[in-house]
Amino acid sequence: MSTIKAVIVEDEKPARDLVKNYLESVPEVEIIGEFDNGFDGLKAINELLPDVIFLDVQMPKLSGFEMLEVLDHKPEVIFTTAYDQYAINAFEQNAVDYLLKPFSKDRFVEAIDKLKEKLTKKQEPSSIDRIKQHFADSEEKIHRVVIKKSGRIHVISTEKINFFEAQDDYVMVYTNEGKYLKQQTMKYFEKHLDPEQFVRVHRSYIANVSCIERIEPYEKSNFILILKDGNKVPVSRGGMQLLKESLDF
Amino acid sequence: MFWFFLEFPLIQIISDAIISNLCFAFLGLLAWYPTRYIPFQRHTPVYSTLAHLVAGLLVLGTWVLVIYVLLSSIFNSDESYIQFLNSTLAWRTILGGLIYLILVLIYYLVSNSQKLQERMQQEERLKNLVRDTELNLLKSQINPHFLFNSLNSISSLTMTNPSEARDMIIRLSDFLRYSLKHRENEYVPLKEELGRMKDYLAIEKIRFGEKLLYEFDIDGSCQEFPVPTMIFQPLFENAIRHSVYESIEPVQIKFSCVSNEGSMKAIILNDYDPDVPTRKGTGVGLQNVRQRIDLAYQGKGSVQWTGEEGVFTVTIVIPRIFV
């Protein structure tokens, strides 16, 4: 078996040192890069094409999960995490392994053994796709959206999103700063956005209720939203009902 | 009294009974008001008794007057009935008085049992509030993320720098021991509280290195100032969670304090990124600190916070207590 190329993405230096130290006695794994944040990690992973990432979940600006969401290259993942009830469920079923900090060397070697086994029989879909699917199936709410636009990663807080518009297999995300195309379904956003703030006003539109300037009648029995940013969003009859419930009028 | 009735036609007996009882029933209802507005607990017994006597005489007088006028005007053609009515007036008054007394007692019983129930419900609510507050305080003490990540750092240091690992274990122990003390809700000199906060920051510093910078500027007069234990912990934890945990750039935390005879004023500043989305639950720690200060100093202390131009500022004023 050829060497396994690994990348460490972890914001705390002692935690990186620990993984490196444990790996010293595993000659078949070679560290080709270590990064203290998700942005650098993301860029490097797409360039260096490692076989595995040792990934911390809680990191500033771009969490481990969010980084996986926008990766082009999809290596295997071994998560390292201190405490995260929800996430553990996702790892258990879909990642190669997850290590709860602090972890012993024996436990670490066990994870490496699982990795070797996994690499010999590549499965489809990749573990990253399965983790994403797991999240999509869950009821977990999102507070920010990660989007890649012309090679740059934008992490957008949902509070700053005015509305979403369906565009074939994509969703266009509108903010005051501009619009961003995200490969995702409307159903996904409808499910994972905070229902207090976002309402599916139309088959093709989800609006941020705090961005509504006014609601005007439009054609026969339909309505249209005039947003604070000046954009107009059509409202279907069902959408109007949901808006009434949400805004209580 | 009964055989008198036998001398009269049935219709008279029944009308007399119906009119007397209906009038009494209506006036009896009125007896509710004196019991409601003359609660025994709030006035002297003499006042309450007098008030009831007046109310009772009023009700009774009205009742006797009303039935006398009604009955005598209905049956004014019947001499013997009028005579009967006149002779039984005293009896009716005494009987009415007794029934009135019983009614008042029953009303008191009902209103007291209602009050008791209300009080029990209120007590239950209060108990829940206290328990929630305690729970929140306990929760705010040690964040499991902090604990497990610190242990992981120590685990790493045992290989790279054993003496620093030992130092960190001691700091962590001191900090944990101090946080357990918190339950006793006692006061400590500021220097002791800050000593443990420095342990906490030193532990986080090992995890985050140059990303975490902090400095203390403490007026000499503050050193012995008594403060509630762990009162600053949620503030430092907030500063770390919302800035260091969410930042790639170095973050500065500054603590300063001054004091005079009557009170101490402490200010905690930290850099933060205003673009980082605020998560739900933000502000719980600050609210807890404010609640504790309010409870401990009966509104004489204060906790205020603002976030402007990337700097978050918490100002806390603690009155001096003499222990």
Image (tube, rainbow, N blue to C red):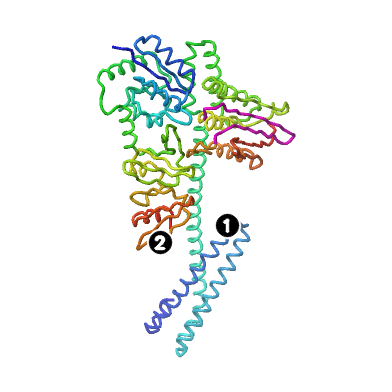
Residue B268 magenta-highlighted: yes
Of the two numbered discs 2 and 1 in the rendering, the one whose residue sits closer to the viewer: 2
Q: Residue furthest front?
A: A150
Q: Assign a secondary structure to mark 1.
A: loop
Could you tell me the amino acid type at mark 1?
A: Phe
Give the letter of the chain under mark 1: B
The C terminus of chain B lies in which quarter of the figure? top right
Pointer 1 local density, CA inside 10 Å: few below 14, some 14–19, many at least 20: some
* Of the pair A27 and B125, the residue shown nearer to us: A27
Could you tell me the amino acid type at mark 2?
A: Pro
Examine the residues drawn in magenta and state their main secondary structure.
Answer: strand
Q: Assign a secondary structure to mark 2.
A: strand
Span of residues in magenta: B247-273
* Residue assigned mark 2: A217
Residue A181: mark in rendering: none
Pointer 2 local density, CA inside 10 Å: few below 14, some 14–19, many at least 20: few
* Residue assigned mark 1: B40
Name the spot of residue A112 as percent of width and height, x first: 33, 16
